[in-house]
Image (spheres, rainbow, N blue to C red):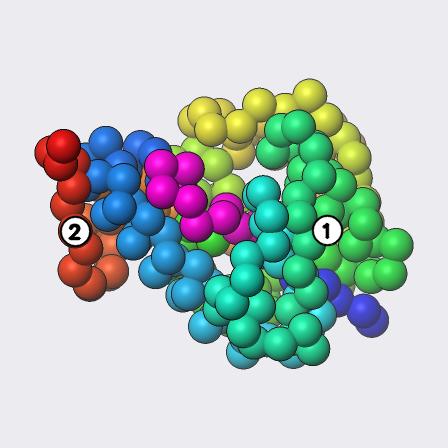
């Protein structure tokens, strides 16, 4: 059975990534954190024997970790759509033209491992939808065995009820759901302090 892993990433633009975190550690500090998260995501996903597609927010990055790995490992695309819901929907819709199982992740969760992603694919043998809930009320993973446009339509994101709205939609569609272990996305300074990330970054919050 054909499997595809979709990885959503933002381009490495100062001021455009981890904006909530940047309020506490500065724009360049937040960029350093996001670079770390992207590289962590690469290190975990390269271990998995599935087709992989990276969808960038604005343009295809040149010579980042995914591009440097070679086209045989990661296909590179640009996200299409006006909002996050439209963009995820378009990536899923495109994927199901050729694949039977699709799992989508972001690049914010330093607790997500290759084994978690393999578990998600395996669960799609018996479940219609697999969801990885995040502690902030969102989700870090979404897997399906079919394209369900309703999961993305008329949805708002970046609020604490994102996960619940998704679960309600799954229930309304009468789909069989597997809920994975709750994990922590890195969006705020508290998230960062609660994580196992250990590296130095420049705090430019007070810079001129």
Vertical position of residue 205 compared to residue 98: above or below: above
* Residue 6 x, y percent position in the rendering: 65, 56
* Residue 56 x, y percent position in the rendering: 59, 49
The numbered mark, 2 or 1, whose residue comes first in the sequence reads 1
**Is residue 201 one of those drawn in magenta?**
no
Closer to the camera, 88 or 143? 88
Vertical position of residue 89 compared to residue 184: above or below: above
Closer to the camera, 95 or 34? 34
**Is residue 12 one of those drawn in magenta?**
yes
**Residue drawn where x is 76% and y is 30% of the image:** 150
Range of the magenta residues? Answer: 8-17
Q: Is residue 179 left or right of residue 88?
A: left
Q: Is residue 105 visible?
A: no
Q: Is residue 38 left or right of residue 141?
A: left
Extreme residue toward the right, this view: 97
| Element class at badge 1 | strand
**Residue drawn where x is 82% and y is 61% of the image:** 99
**Residue drawn where x is 57% and y is 68% of the image:** 67
| Element class at badge 2 | loop
Residue ID for mark 2: 202
**Residue drawn where x is 68% and y is 54% of the image:** 77
Vertical position of residue 16 compared to residue 10: above or below: above
* Residue 167 x, y percent position in the rendering: 61, 34
Q: For label 1, count other residues whose C-alpha is less than 10 Å away and answer few (under 14), some (14-19) or many (20+).
A: many
Residue ID for mark 1: 144
Please state, as top left, top right, bottom left or bottom right, where the C terminus lies in the image.
top left
Closer to the camera, 79 or 128? 79
């Amino acid at each position: 059975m054909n499997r595809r892993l979709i990885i959503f990433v933002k381009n490495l633009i100062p001021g455009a990534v981890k904006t909530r975190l940047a309020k506490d550690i500065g724009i360049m500090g937040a960029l350093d954190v996001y670079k770390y998260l992207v590289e962590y995501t690469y290190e975990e996903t390269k271990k998995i024997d599935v087709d992989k597609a990276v969808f960038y927010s604005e343009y295809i990055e040149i010579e980042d970790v995914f591009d440097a790995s070679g086209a045989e490992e990661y296909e590179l695309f640009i996200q299409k759509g006006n909002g996050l819901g439209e963009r995820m929907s378009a990536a899923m819709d495109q994927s199901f033209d050729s694949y039977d199982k699709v799992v989508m992740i972001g690049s914010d969760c330093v607790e997500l491992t290759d084994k978690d992603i393999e578990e998600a694919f395996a669960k799609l043998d018996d479940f219609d939808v697999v969801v990885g809930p995040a502690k902030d009320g969102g989700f870090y993973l979404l897997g399906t065995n079919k394209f369900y446009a309703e999961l993305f339509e008329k949805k708002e994101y970046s609020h604490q009820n994102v996960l619940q709205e998704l679960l309600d939609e799954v229930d309304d569609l009468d789909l069989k759901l597997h809920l994975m272990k709750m994990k922590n996305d890195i969006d705020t300074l508290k998230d960062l302090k609660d994580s196992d990330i250990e590296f130095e970054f420049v705090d430019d919050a007070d810079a001129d």
